[in-house]
Amino acid sequence: MMKHNLQERGLFSLRRDGREEDDNKVDKILNPWAADSRLWNFIFLASCLIGVSIDPLFLYVPIVDDNRKCLKRDYNMEIIALVLRSVTDLFYVFHVCFRLHNALKMSKELHVSIFTNFPWFHLLIDILSILPLPQVVVLLYFSQITGSRSLSGRKFINLILLLQYVPRLFRVYLTAKEIGKGFDSLISQRVWVRCAFFFFVYLNFGHVFGAFWYFYSIFRETACWHEACKYHMPKQCTPGFFDCSLGIESHPIKNLTKLNQYCPINPPDPKIFNFGMFSGAIESRIVNNTDFPTKFTRSFFWGLKNLSSFGSNLDTSGNIVENLFAILISILGLLLFLYLIGNLQVCILTLSLC
């Protein structure tokens, strides 16, 4: 009798272990964001980090031609940004296809429904991250930036460019979180991963805000052209686009010298037109510069400086979008700074206890 009970207990234990092993397989395979492949997670995280750093490069494509008072493209920057973005998108596509293939295969072998176990929300984040919104908005809708009736188009461009970063940054956070779980046995290394991640996020926001500062500076200068045409030279202007590729014959303003009078840039005159927080970019003429390292470092420094000072040095005009942009810099600067300092304190405390 005792022998029979022991055999039943042993059989029950084996069945329970078998069920637990199957459950682990289901959880490990159907959850494509589990830390089942540390090497691939590191590679994918690196591609995500590079990806969110590449997107702002599209904002440097427009350049102001001060002599012809129109906008042109930096085609070298356009090609580089397109190639780099396409390469990082390939990692997203491979990640999604590979995980879906494994999930479908294992769900058939284990007779488990993929629809109830697969993290579809994470898949949605990946799909939204792959969408080529910066390419479409900046490159295909370039004329909307320069048109005299482009206010609604500009608002749409601003919204799309800002919303693009939400799923991509969230994807970086999810991947970094899964990698951090793999360091449970090495607590100090896990803390350093968190600190490095949040420090990168802080620097990347400086990069993003600097790129938007450059992009919005061009918006404000073209807005001055539109106002000069509408209020000061209505009879000398025709509806059209300030696009250099259309030629001088299609330029809305025939007398370009008057734009220097109504849109002074060296130095700017707030009494005539207030460029606000973008006057530095316009006066320094980085919006005319085709040398990418020069305008990138200037813009990155501006973004990091104002992010670190919580936007306290920003002198804005009465423009609503400009003031909302300044408010966003102040709020995110404060939150990121507090979060970074908090994680660094945890990192130092953990290392001192190890």
Image (cartoon, rainbow, N blue to C red):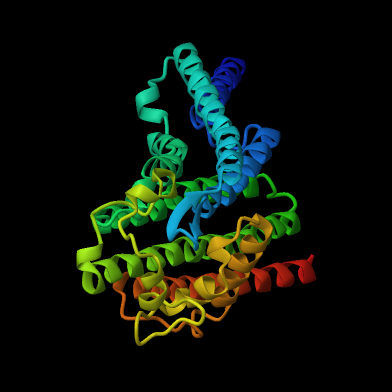
Taking 266 as reference, is 232 left or right?
left
Most extreme residue toward the bottom is 271
Image position of 92 with respect to 337: above or below:
above
Q: Residue at x 49, y 79 (%)?
A: 311
Quadrant (top left/top right/bottom left/bottom right) for the N terminus: top right
| Any part of residue 217 in sight | yes
| Any part of residue 178 in sight | no
Quarter-of-image position of residue 245 = top left
Q: How many marks?
A: 0
> How far from the left and from the top, in percent, is residue 22?
53, 22
Image position of 224 with respect to 81: above or below:
below
Image position of 156 with respect to 36: above or below:
below
> How far from the left and from the top, in percent, is residue 354?
79, 65
Residue sitting nearer the eye, 207 or 147: 147
> How far from the left and from the top, in percent, is residue 111?
42, 14
Residue sitting nearer the eye, 28 or 48: 48
Residue sitting nearer the eye, 200 or 349: 200
Q: Residue at x 44, y 74 (%)?
A: 331
Most extreme residue toward the top is 109
Taking 173 as reference, is 227 left or right?
left
Q: Residue at x 50, y 18 (%)?
A: 101
Most extreme residue toward the left is 235
> How far from the left and from the top, in percent, is residue 172?
55, 48
Residue sitting nearer the eye, 33 or 294: 294
Q: Residue at x 50, y 28 (%)?
A: 96
